[in-house]
């Protein structure tokens, strides 16, 4: 198990979930491992009565997490909506882990996702040998979640074709999955619900029908409100990555993380932090998730091709790669930012030189 690259949330935070269960004396919805209050504590962090510290998984509005948990305790499904990199999948995984103890019942939505991926499929060898039978049926994560009374997760719902999306309507409204080939149905057990994620950059690709929208309660996850909040998110996720990958590098200085977050926030918002200089924004999203990736990549460079200490030269390539997605328009935006903002900051000379050398 120690060689696994990425643990599921319920494995990685098993100790926290167990401590929360021990302290949890409130009323739980049927088939939930924790009360809704403890689910929120697991997500936003806090100190338990016995002094045990629960680490925050989501740094942001506690109220949003309360709305999400409360929704899943009703018969309405939950849609987490927002910009790329706003922790939609991360929150979805941790909600499923805290509620069901199982975050693995997941369908990845793509343009090629078929109706069979959501409802059920068939083992065609058995189907030919035996005809339609329960043994020939291939269960999907949604079908398993219905039978077990657990949470099913659907990633990138709006990338799935509209006709396939509407497969969910009967499941969400009737809590039933008909299997006409066997003249039967699968009825959902208490505790079953669906968490879907959608990217607002995909708006207009495959819009949800009004009938399907009504089955979801939508929670919009925003980009981090403050600079310090975003720095804290990046710091925590980078430390987790460094521990998992066992990199022979020192913990990154907070100042280096601050500089990356500053660059991303300024270009994303189209204005410098002091509000004095307006900037052009690149076509890339420059999300918090990308900032985490830039620092992680810099740590790998420092560990294996440097002195083990993260510096501007290690970060430069990652920053440019994150900003310049279009080699023409984005490159002009980046060069203008480099010359009008980065160059003028006295304590950023090393960043300017490192980025200029790669430009």
Image: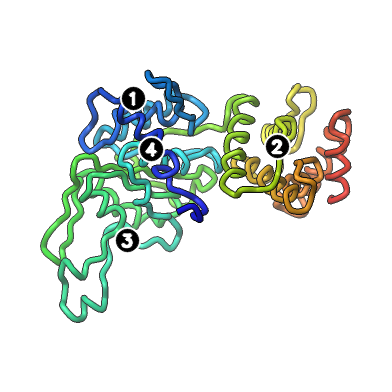
**Mark 4 lies on residue:** 95
Q: Secondary structure at mark 1?
A: helix
Comes first in the chain, label 3 or label 1: 1
Comes first in the chain, label 2 or label 4: 4
In percent of the image, x 81 and y 38: which residue is there? 337
Rounded to the nearest whole Å, what is the CA distance between mark 2 and mark 4?
29 Å
Residue 267: tell me if it is visible: no
Please state which of the two labelled residues, at mark 2 or mark 1, is closer to the viewer.
Answer: 2
Rounded to the nearest whole Å, what is the CA distance between mark 3 and mark 1?
35 Å
**Mark 3 lies on residue:** 115
State the colouring used for the structure image.
rainbow
In front: 33, or 62? 33
Q: Secondary structure at mark 2?
A: loop
**Mark 2 lies on residue:** 252
Rounded to the nearest whole Å, what is the CA distance between mark 4 and mark 1?
12 Å
In front: 229, or 255? 255
Residue 330 percent coordinates (x, y): 75, 48
Q: In the displayed image of the protein, which residue is found farthest to the top?
A: 49
Rounded to the nearest whole Å, what is the CA distance between mark 2 and mark 1?
34 Å
In percent of the image, x 53 and y 32: which residue is there? 222
Label for residue 37? 1
Comes first in the chain, label 3 or label 2: 3
Q: Secondary structure at mark 3?
A: helix
Residue 129 percent coordinates (x, y): 19, 81
Residue 217 percent coordinates (x, y): 35, 35
């Amino acid at each position: 198990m120690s060689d696994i690259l990425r643990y599921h949330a319920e494995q990685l935070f098993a100790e926290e979930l167990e401590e929360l269960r021990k302290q949890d004396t409130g009323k739980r919805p049927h088939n939930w491992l924790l009360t809704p209050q403890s689910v929120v504590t697991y997500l936003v962090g806090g100190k338990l009565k016995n002094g045990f510290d629960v680490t925050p998984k989501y740094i942001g509005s506690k109220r949003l997490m309360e709305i999400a948990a409360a929704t899943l305790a009703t018969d309405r499904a939950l849609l987490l909506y927002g910009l790329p990199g706003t922790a939609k999948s991360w929150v979805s995984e941790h909600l499923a882990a805290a509620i069901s103890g199982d975050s693995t019942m997941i369908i990845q939505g793509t343009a090629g996702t078929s109706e069979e991926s959501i409802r059920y499929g068939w083992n065609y060898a058995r189907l030919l040998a035996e005809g339609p039978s329960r043994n020939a049926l291939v269960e999907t994560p949604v079908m398993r979640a219905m039978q077990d009374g657990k949470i099913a997760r659907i990633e990138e719902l709006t990338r799935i074709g509209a006709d396939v999306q509407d497969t969910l309507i009967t499941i969400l409204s009737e809590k039933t999955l008909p299997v006409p080939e066997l003249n039967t149905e699968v009825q959902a057990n208490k505790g079953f619900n669906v968490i879907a994620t959608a990217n607002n950059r995909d708006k207009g690709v495959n819009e949800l029908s009004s009938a399907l929208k009504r089955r979801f309660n939508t929670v919009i996850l925003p980009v981090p409100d403050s600079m310090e909040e975003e720095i804290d998110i990046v710091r925590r996720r980078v430390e987790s990555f460094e521990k998992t990958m066992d990199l022979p590098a020192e913990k990154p200085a907070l100042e280096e993380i601050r500089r990356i977050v500053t660059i991303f926030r300024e270009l994303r918002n189209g204005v410098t932090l002091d509000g004095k200089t307006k900037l052009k924004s690149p076509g890339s999203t420059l999300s918090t998730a990308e900032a985490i990736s830039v620092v992680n990549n810099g740590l790998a460079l420092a560990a294996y091709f440097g002195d083990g200490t993260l510096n501007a030269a290690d970060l430069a390539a990652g920053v440019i790669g994150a900003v310049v997605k279009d080699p023409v328009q984005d490159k002009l935006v980046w060069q203008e930012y480099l010359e009008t903002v980065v160059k003028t900051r006295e304590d950023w000379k090393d960043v300017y030189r490192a980025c200029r050398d790669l430009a």
